[in-house]
Image (spheres, grey):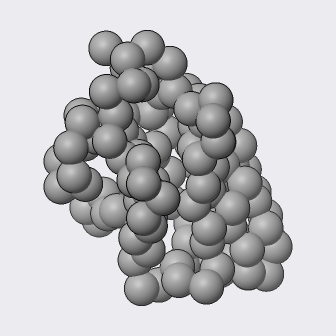
Amino acid sequence: QVQLVQSGGGLVQAGGSLRLSCAGSGRMSSIDAMGWYRQSPGKERELIAAISNRGNTYYEESVKGRFTISRDNANTLYLQMTNLKPMDTAMYFCAAYFSGITSPDFWGQGTQVTVSS
């Protein structure tokens, strides 16, 4: 089993920055990749960034150039968010995958990010 515990998030004005963290524990040696999703009310949860053990990254088009995903040696995943926009308001979830980034095997508990205009 893998446990993912998120921290960070909150309320920020448009143009501001926030950093989300996701601390992984348990069988993290079996994890091939980790990612960040977000979900707004009435919308489906969407993958916005992912990083593999080899350091390959993926970004959804709307966050490219503004968000940076990273992972440290202590199995903590980060999402640095800059130039935040009201459209970024959502519940953010971290995820871990045994293989690929199609279907997460584990989820964090979620954290709210609200960007005011």
At horizontal 48% and vertical 59% (from top left) the residue drawn is 55
**Residue 28 appears in which quarter of the rendering?**
top left
Residue closest to the far front? 54
Image height of 67 relative to 76, above or below: below
Image height of 55 relative to 13, above or below: above
Report whether residue 61 is seen.
Answer: yes
The image quadrant where one finds the N terminus is: top left
Residue 91 image point, x, y percent: 49, 51
Report whether residue 42 is seen.
Answer: no
**Residue 107 appears in which quarter of the rendering?**
top left
Image height of 53 relative to 65, above or below: above
Q: Horizontally, is 90 left or right of 44 in the view?
A: right
At horizontal 42% and vertical 48% (from top left) the residue drawn is 53
Residue 3 image point, x, y percent: 44, 20
**For the image shown, how many numbered marks are present on the structure?**
0
Residue 75 image point, x, y percent: 56, 32
Q: Horizontally, is 113 left or right of 51 in the view?
A: right
Q: Pick the residue in front: 33 or 85.
A: 33
The image quadrant where one finds the C terminus is: bottom right
At horizontal 44% and vertical 74% (from top left) the residue drawn is 59
Residue 106 image point, x, y percent: 31, 31
**Residue 102 appears in which quarter of the rendering?**
bottom left
